[in-house]
Image: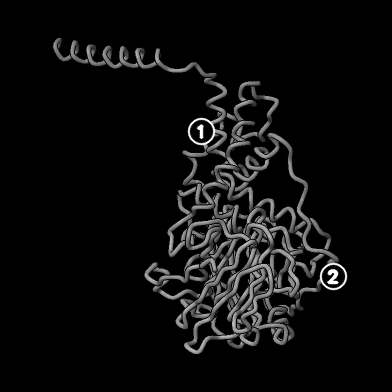
Amino acid sequence: MMKKALMTTFIASSILSSTCVFAAQLTPVNPQEELAYNLGLQAFIYGAGPLTVAQVRAASTNVDAPMDNGAAPLNMMGKTLKLAGPEDRVVPTVNNDTLYSQSHINLNDTGPLVIEIPPTNNRYFIVQLLDDYSEAVGNLIEDNVGQDGGKFLLVNKGWKGVEGGIPDGIDGVIESRTPLVWYIQRTGVSGDKDLAAALKIHDGFINYPLSELGKSHKSVQLTHAKTGISPVPQPKGLGWFSLIDKELRNNPIASDASIVDQFKYIGIGGDEPFNPDKLTEDQKKGLMRALNAAPQIIQYASRDLGTKNNGWAMMYEGGRYGNDFLSRASINFRAAGLNTKERALYPNRYTDSDDQQLSGENKYRMTMPADAPAKAFWSLTMYDAKNLFMVPNSIDRYSISTNREDELIYNKDGSLTVCIQNAKPTDTNCNWLPAPKDDFYLHMRLYEPTQAVLDNTYALPQVIKQ
């Protein structure tokens, strides 16, 4: 027994001695500042998902009535009546393929909410539901709704139901782990000639409280917006951490408690709101350093995100991030409101086949084979490389989409070639996607992707400099 005790003491002493020797070789730091810096980095990366959703919610609900640019007060629905363009600058990489309906919902206010889908007559649509952390709650599509439409009930996690079970007329129940839910609905449009027909179906997507089930409901009455949704004023300095703290406290995730608990050392995620006045000057310095570094780290990670396929970043993680908080932050930086991979894939790239930055100073070509890996349709959209918004051009074309067949020229073998350049190409058999004069970013969308591309066994076409 004595030998065992002596051995334990010897081992402990050796470890402490080694640690002290190692410590003597370290460069002195301010431990309080460094701890705040490291926890601040983690808190920002963890909180970037809900922060992005909160920023979109704040901008989209900062109106007095439902608008025709997609904005609406909390718990109401806005809609777009045209395809998005360069003037739409709230959510990065918004698509140019579909009409949108949008609603930011607080189930604590509304109670169980009925999501009504109209008959869709084979038209592409999706109702996408995301929680406050941009995690998928559910997707309603033709495969699980049918062409005749239906009614589905959106409820808080743990909802006990109503007396007698699920009410008659409800086709299914969808449960959210957070009371705040982002409703994004998309309706496909096959070019300008199809817009009027698309709008008739688009009008039929509505929401209302369960208490109003069985009553007559009109389509959303929209007020005309003179501009796109205006971004909300940005906080200054440590105010960003106040926003993150608010989301973490109001929408806690039980399974993440052990992660969020450590942020309490810097006043985030605790019982009381974040208050920088309660921090020391060293803690404030650490958090300001974190505030400077974290967005740069997220942006850096977003440029090399996910599995690669011939130079395209595939972003398979969209809507299902689990504990991969850096991917969640990076994807939301680049494309907030991403679908799950089975519903849509978003291959994207900043570089050409030689791994050089895409630039309007050059000319490029991309040819998609006839067996494009999308069961619904696919598109390729042009964005500015810095801000990820569409860029005005002389022909008002921001994407090439197979949902707009009347605009396209196919090769004899059924493939489709896209000329990507600033000036109009001389080749009249090429589909021109105008590029800005400066650096740009390409974002492909594969709606209802095939299994081959989901498995990453389908080789996507390269973007080749001419």
Apparent side of residue 261 relative to residue 277 in the rendered image (left or right): left
- Residue at label 2? 224
Q: Is 394 drawn above or below residue 180 in the view shown?
A: below
Apparent side of residue 220 relative to residue 362 in the rendered image (left or right): right
Q: Is 354 drawn above or below residue 265 in the view shown?
A: below
Q: Quadrant of the N terminus?
A: top left
Residue 220 visible in image: yes
Residue 164 visible in image: no
The kind of secondary structure element at disc 1 is helix
- Residue at label 1? 262
The residue sitting at 72% across, 68% down in the picture is 85
The spot of residue 216 in percent (x, y) is: 74, 80
- The front one of 1 and 438 is 438
- The front one of 422 and 314 is 422
User: Residue 270 sits in which quadrant?
Assistant: top right
Tell me the amino acid under the disc marked 2.
His
Apparent side of residue 270 relative to residue 19 in the rendered image (left or right): right
The spot of residue 49 in percent (x, y) is: 58, 50
The kind of secondary structure element at disc 2 is loop
- The front one of 396 and 404 is 396
Tell me the amino acid under the disc marked 1.
Gln
Specify which label sits upstream in the sequence, 2 or 1: 2
The residue sitting at 51% across, 60% down in the picture is 318
Tell me if mark 1 has few (under 14), some (14-19) or many (20+) residues whose alpha carbon lies within 10 angstroms of its own: some
The spot of residue 145 in percent (x, y) is: 54, 79
User: Residue 284 sits in which quadrant?
Assistant: top right
The spot of residue 99 in percent (x, y) is: 68, 74
The residue sitting at 58% across, 81% down in the picture is 402
Q: Quadrant of the C terminus?
A: bottom right
Tell me if mark 2 has few (under 14), some (14-19) or many (20+) residues whose alpha carbon lies within 10 angstroms of its own: few
